[in-house]
Image (cartoon, rainbow, N blue to C red):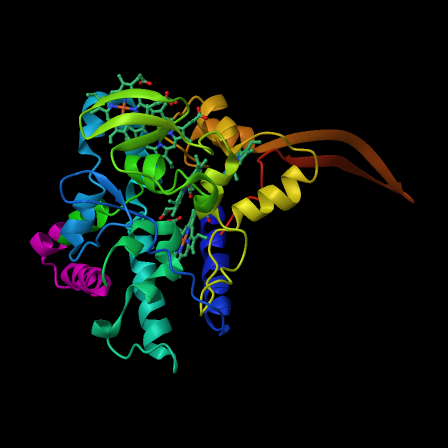
Amino acid sequence: MSKRRSNVLSFSAMVLALFSLLLLGAFTSTTLAAGIGKDGTIAAKRGKATTLDELIAMYDSSSCFECHQDIHEEWSQSVHARSVYGTGRTAATFRTAFTNGFMNWAYSGVEKPEDVEVEHLMGCAKCHLPQLADATDDVAKELVATIFDWMDAYQNDDMATFEKHQETLLDLNINCLVCHNRMAITHKWTDGYPQDGVVYGKNAGEHYDPNFPIVRQGPNMEASILCGQCHGLGPNLELDNPTQCATGYGSYLFSYITNGGDKTCQECHMLESGLGHNIQSYRSEVMAEKAIDWHVTARPMVWRDGRNVRPKVMVDVAMTNKAGHGIPDG
Ligand code: HEC
Ligand code: HEC
Ligand code: HEC
Ligand code: HEC
Ligand code: HEC
């Protein structure tokens, strides 16, 4: 608990510090990435979702759930399955970022919630909901309104409205199609854009889903960079107003790998842990146990101080971080 708290405190401190940075830089638009058509097929560079429901439908992974039940069960226990809602705190922090951030800043162009555009939200959605880049500015406004209405409903004890919005927020997540299509190709000029009707996996071949009849080899499915796309290098300097949240991928590259570490995120988090798609951190006992090596030796002794004999203990504690990055992150 106390560890969690310090994590959140340091996180808020960083967000505040970095939010106050105003750097002028080119906004890298992600609008060229894949979108999924209303008919359930993925279309690189096809149209945009105009409502939250359309965005949810674009990345509807319910067909995957039918055939990959075990994986679905694992995934639904992971925080990727609620990457906007989180434990409630993530969505609430979005609101704080919004009211204490954009609405307060002289040059953001946002004075009231209706002024918000996708670009404003990408400072968080870049990693928490990357598919927001496949939606129009109306969807950004609807998302902000939903978070505000959800919190107001809670305060007014209006549970029906609260639960309705909670359900929408929970449907906005990092699901099968986000990893196995949208984020599956990192170098799009080299390897191409994610395609219609294709899921990207470790092997290539036919696939039984009529909407996704092809499996192609995802160039990074077993590589850390797949995860690194959302797990942060440090400040997101490509944004007009940089944010910082997760920095785990930076720590992995600059500390773990440079010190001779040779495991991938997938090896530790999915394979050796036995957790598969239930990708976890300290909330899982398996991961918590792997985190730190403790060596404690204690030697009882007696200290003579003139005529006084005092019993003492000499304790040596050695703690080694065995995770592939600094902990806690954020
Ligand atoms: C009609 C059943 C069916 C549906 C629907 C389905 N799959 Fe599959 N999928 C399979 C089978 C069978 C395999 C091969 C065995 C395996 O690896 O589990 C497979 C394999 C895969 C693989 C592994 C490819 C590899 O070898 O690396 C991925 C990734 C995958 N599916 C993702 C998805 C996603 C994402 C969806 C939803 C868009 C989906 N599947 C929907 C049946 C289905
Ligand atoms: C670079 C990708 C990235 C960006 C940008 C980002 N986040 Fe995060 N965020 C993460 C990841 C990954 C985690 C998981 C924990 C960790 O490694 O810190 C996380 C964790 C969190 C948590 C803690 C959740 C919990 O309950 O433990 C909150 C709250 C949060 N983010 C809110 C935000 C907000 C608000 C913004 C925008 C100001 C934002 N994040 C921007 C990737 C990001
Ligand atoms: C956070 C990203 C992420 C999400 C979300 C995700 N996957 Fe995967 N999936 C992976 C990675 C990475 C691998 C390869 C792991 C490895 O190295 O073996 C994988 C492997 C697979 C495989 C190959 C067989 C296996 O068990 O390794 C199937 C099938 C699959 N995923 C289906 C799904 C389905 C269905 C969903 C949604 C319920 C889903 N995945 C959600 C990242 C993801
Ligand atoms: C599309 C972006 C994205 C991708 C790809 C992604 N993650 Fe995440 N991941 C997140 C976000 C955002 C969170 C935090 C959600 C929250 O707490 O609100 C998270 C949470 C986690 C957590 C749990 C942290 C906690 O506080 O308990 C772990 C562990 C994790 N991710 C590992 C991985 C691994 C391993 C991969 C690659 C196989 C991966 N992620 C791929 C965005 C992503
Ligand atoms: C050598 C094994 C190992 C590797 C490699 C590794 N991790 Fe971890 N990771 C762990 C362990 C163990 C924990 C649990 C720490 C704890 O209990 O506090 C953890 C915790 C995390 C957390 C939660 C951080 C927090 O705030 O507590 C995230 C997010 C995460 N890992 C993501 C990743 C990503 C993304 C990669 C690849 C870039 C990766 N990990 C590589 C072992 C590893």
In this rendering, position of residue 17 left or right of residue 52: right
Determine the quadrant in which ligand 3 lies.
top left
Q: Is residue 46 magenta?
A: no
Bounds of the magenta span?
A: 137-164
Quadrant in the rendering for residue 210? top left
Compare residues 82 and 158 and report the one nearer the observer. Answer: 82
Q: Is residue 154 magenta?
A: yes
Compared to 99, does 306 lie above or below?
Answer: above
Q: Residue 139 at what x, y percent from top left?
A: 20, 60
Quadrant in the rendering for residue 149? bottom left
Q: Residue at x 20, y 38 (%)?
A: 41
Q: Residue at x 65, y 33 (%)?
A: 261
Compare residues 27 and 21 and report the one nearer the observer. Answer: 27
In this rendering, position of residue 9 left or right of residue 176: right
Q: Residue at x 49, y 47 (%)?
A: 3
In this rendering, position of residue 180 left or right of residue 307: left
Residue 46 visible (yes or no): yes
Q: Residue 103 at what x, y percent from top left?
A: 32, 76
Residue 129 visible (yes or no): no
In this rendering, position of residue 234 left or right of residue 204: right
Q: Residue 42 at what x, y percent from top left?
A: 24, 40
Compare residues 148 and 238 and report the one nearer the observer. Answer: 238
Furthest toward the bottom, the residue is 106
Q: Residue 327 at what x, y percent from top left?
A: 55, 44
How many numbered discs, if any? 0
Compared to 17, does 4 lie above or below?
Answer: above
Dividing the image into 4 quarters, which one contains the N terminus? top left
Q: Residue at x 44, y 47 (%)?
A: 230
Compare residues 196 and 231 and report the one nearer the observer. Answer: 196
- SS majority, magenta: helix
